[in-house]
């Protein structure tokens, strides 16, 4: 069978794209090396932050606002609670670029943002301990997405709309042409158009097309700590981002009694995605415990830690573009640890690019040409 569109990688971006394309009447095949949602990509771990006053730059705001609208739509279609409006507090020195961008994004796009000194923040959230040189910016309309539930919802809708999903079917090579051939360990599939949303495997896949993609698979860690629910539960404590000159951390309140969740955004080690990740170890534990002891000292014992994969670009901006030599192949990769919140809108954008050759979002910042 010849498909209208094949999507390689049916995780967060790919599953959303599969739904929007099937909904538009396209004959879609989604291929995944595992069975999404799973723990081999960047989408596991229960929760992700969604924030709109964007510390990475105001040009992201229209895209993430559209994503927020689509998450609300997905909630309605799935009849499931996917978004928790916990608020998100951004903490750092007032002169740091992340905090400056949060404020500029809120001003430019008229987003709600509350400003607190360190003392005011500690009064509002007694579980915090902040030095006087830090400030806090709370975005009350932001919050948390339930990651696996989001992917399951898109999966159900995509299949109901007629998309096909082949799980445990790893793609080993791609051959471009007027018709694209996708080779797996089992067989060859043929399609008019191809979307590659393969996360940490995108780089090696595109090497089969002699295209060098500047995306580095990176090992990351996160952990949960016992929490006093009166201080740290989802009803009283927000999700959070801490930005320093030499490090950045993020985390979540105790949701459904799971405990405080904490991860480090920067750093990490380059990995081969085909090899098992080195398990969460004492070094990982020490780093996270040092942070939480300093800034949330009323936490409890570490419950457990996990590992995940980031797919990093040199500038930490995404890649969403047609391949320059193959206009029937679209790549969405390098989401650099802050992409999941966008995946609903990325899926829509990929569908629009496939259907019309353009989309409603300004994707200039994400063009591959910046690396060529």
Image (spheres, rainbow, N blue to C red):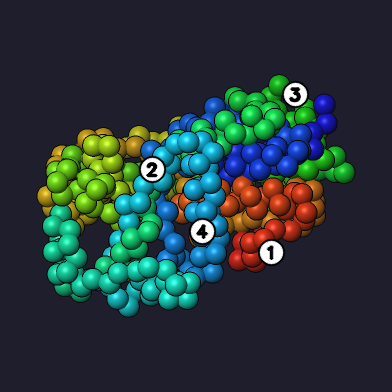
Horizontally, is 212 left or right of 108 in the view? Answer: right
C-alpha distance separating marks 4 and 2 = 17 Å
Q: Which dot marks residue 187?
A: 3
Mark 4 is surrounded, within 10 Å at the Cα level, by few (under 14), some (14 to 19) or many (20 or more) other residues, namely many
Q: Is residue 371 above or below residue 72?
A: below
Residue at image location 41% in from the left, 46% down from the top: 83
C-alpha distance separating marks 1 and 3 = 33 Å
Residue with the mark numbered 2: 47
Residue at image location 52% in from the left, 53% down from the top: 69
From the viewer's perspective, is the residue at label 1 or at label 2 nearer? 2
> Which corner quadrant holds the N terminus?
top right
> Which corner quadrant holds the C terminus?
bottom right
> Which is more N-terminal, label 3 or label 2?
2
Horizontally, is 215 left or right of 331 in the view? Answer: left
C-alpha distance separating marks 2 and 3 = 35 Å
Mark 2 is surrounded, within 10 Å at the Cα level, by few (under 14), some (14 to 19) or many (20 or more) other residues, namely many
Horizontally, is 217 left or right of 225 in the view? Answer: right
């Amino acid at each position: 069978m010849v498909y209208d569109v094949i999507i390689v990688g049916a995780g967060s971006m790919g599953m959303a794209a599969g739904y929007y394309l099937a909904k538009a009447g396209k004959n879609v095949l989604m291929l995944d090396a595992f069975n999404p949602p799973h723990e081999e990509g960047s989408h596991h771990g229960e929760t992700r932050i969604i924030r709109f006053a964007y510390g990475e730059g105001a040009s992201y705001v229209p895209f993430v606002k559209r994503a927020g609208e689509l998450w609300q739509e997905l909630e309605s279609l799935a009849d499931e609670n996917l978004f928790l409006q916990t608020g998100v507090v951004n903490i750092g020195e007032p002169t740091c670029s992340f905090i400056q961008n949060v404020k500029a994004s809120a001003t430019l796009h008229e987003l709600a943002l509350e400003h607190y000194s360190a003392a005011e923040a500690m009064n509002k959230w007694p579980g915090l301990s902040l030095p006087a040189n830090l400030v806090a910016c709370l975005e009350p309309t932001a919050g948390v997405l339930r990651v696996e539930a989001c992917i399951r919802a898109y999966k159900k809708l995509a299949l109901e709309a007629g998309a096909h999903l082949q799980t445990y079917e790893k793609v080993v090579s791609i051959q471009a042409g007027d018709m694209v051939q996708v080779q797996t360990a089992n067989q060859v599939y043929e399609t008019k158009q191809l979307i590659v949303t393969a996360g940490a495997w995108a780089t090696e896949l595109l090497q089969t097309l002699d295209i060098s993609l500047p995306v580095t698979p990176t090992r990351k860690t996160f952990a949960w700590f016992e929490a006093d629910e009166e201080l740290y539960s989802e009803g009283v404590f927000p999700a959070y981002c801490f930005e320093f000159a030499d490090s950045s951390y993020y985390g979540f309140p105790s949701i459904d009694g799971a405990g405080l969740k904490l991860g480090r955004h920067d750093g990490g080690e380059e990995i081969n995605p085909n090899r098992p990740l080195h398990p969460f170890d004492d070094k990982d534990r020490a780093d996270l415990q040092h942070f939480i002891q300093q800034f949330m000292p009323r936490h409890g014992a570490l419950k457990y830690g996990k590992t995940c994969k980031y797919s990093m670009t040199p500038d930490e901006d995404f890649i969403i573009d047609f391949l320059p030599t193959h206009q029937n192949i679209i790549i969405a990769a390098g989401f650099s640890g802050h992409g999941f919140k966008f995946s609903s809108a990325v899926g829509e954008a990929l569908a629009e690019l496939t259907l019309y050759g353009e989309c409603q979002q300004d994707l200039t910042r994400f063009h591959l040409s910046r690396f060529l």
